[in-house]
Image (cartoon, grey):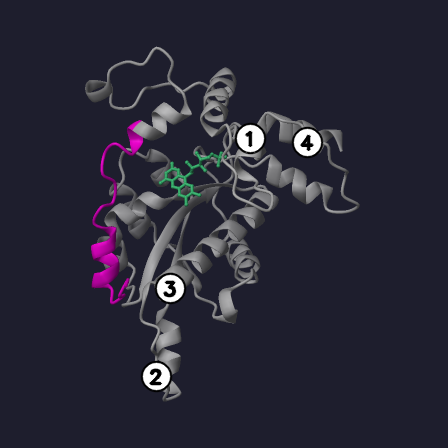
Amino acid sequence: MDNLLDLIEKRFGERPDIEAPAEGKETIRKLLDHRVIRRFAEKPVEPGLLRLLSAAALASPTKSDLQQGDILIVADAAKRARIAALLPDQPWIAGAPALVLFLGNNRRQRQIAEWRGKPFPNDHLDAFFNAAVDGAIVMATFIVAAEAAGLGCCPISTIRNHAAAVSDWCGLPDHVFPVAGLGLGWPADPGHMSARLPLSARVHLDRFDETGIEAGVDAYDRRRHGIFPYRQQRDEARFGHAEFYGWSEDKARQYATPERADFGAYVRARGFRLD
Ligand SMILES: Cc1cc2nc3c(=O)[nH]c(=O)nc-3n(C[C@H](O)[C@H](O)[C@H](O)COP(=O)(O)O)c2cc1C
């Protein structure tokens, strides 16, 4: 158990008083030791392995058994390069030997209604939301399977900055949309463990509780800075140079600039009503 508790302490800065589980230690250890990987060895990922990981991911739970999370493997190197070229400030996308897109697919449900001659009075926000959640579950499960096989992964939500172009290039019809991309390959370095907010800030017991959250975030900023400080400060021209630059300063700066404000328009253009 020490190993699991050590990993929890390293990640969350607290050591909970918990019992070792009877089974599953290795799986839980791997989950606790997760790292995003952005540097890859020049070694291909076998298409068969991508199929296997897809099967594992698609065995994940799915809302109402509707199976609304799909996977699009971008096998064509030219198409991969075209997508990567949209995001030149993230060179690890071009450097990843494999690229997979995770999709929300609410089209099939609508097709089924039509094929079975039934009404579909559910054209509202929940239709989009359910497909997005299923797509995210499929991606998370794919990552777990990939990391278990020794691969490294980097999710790429920034493909949604170019959602219309990516959708057109990949032939996505109405009611099918990208949730995120995933660059993956064999890690060229082990990455680093990214410290998280304390469990007490994110695990609520019976009732949502944010007592002491601001002090908790301050303490997290300091702890995280001690482990892996930010190398650069975001948008210094606008916000100046902060003497202490922590996670909360970085996230506040990140979201002080509009990001993907046009995504709602894209989703509506793909046929969703978001009422
Ligand atoms: C839905 C989602 C989208 C992400 N999008 C990007 C992205 O566009 N570019 C990127 O470099 N990393 C992306 N990431 C990776 C996160 O930055 C990374 O998971 C986070 O910094 C925490 O690090 P860790 O995964 O090593 O714990 C994304 C992660 C998730 C879950």
Q: Earlier in the sequence, mark 3 or mark 1?
A: 3
Left or right of 157, for residue 135: right
Say which mark, if any, is on residue 198: 1
Residue type, numbered disc 3? Asp
Query: What residue range appears in magenta?
Result: 253-275
Residue type, numbered disc 2? Pro
Give how far across and how far down residue 79 sits, in percent: 30, 52
Give how far across and how far down residue 244 sits, in percent: 38, 13
CA gap, disc 4 and disc 3: 37 Å
Label 3 CB less than 8 angstroms from ligand 1: no
Q: Secondary structure at mark 4?
A: loop
Locate the C terminus and report the quarter of the image it occupies: bottom left
Vertical relation: 28 (above or below) 116: above
Residue beneath label 3, please? 126
Q: Secondary structure at mark 2?
A: loop
For label 2, the crowd category at 10 Å Cα-Cα, with few meaning under 14, some 14 to 19 and many 20 or more, is few
Q: Residue at x 29, y 64 (%)?
A: 172
Residue type, numbered disc 1? Pro
Q: Secondary structure at mark 1?
A: loop
CA gap, disc 4 and disc 1: 11 Å
Q: Closest to the observer: 86 or 229?
A: 229
Give how far across and how far down residue 125 sits, in percent: 33, 63
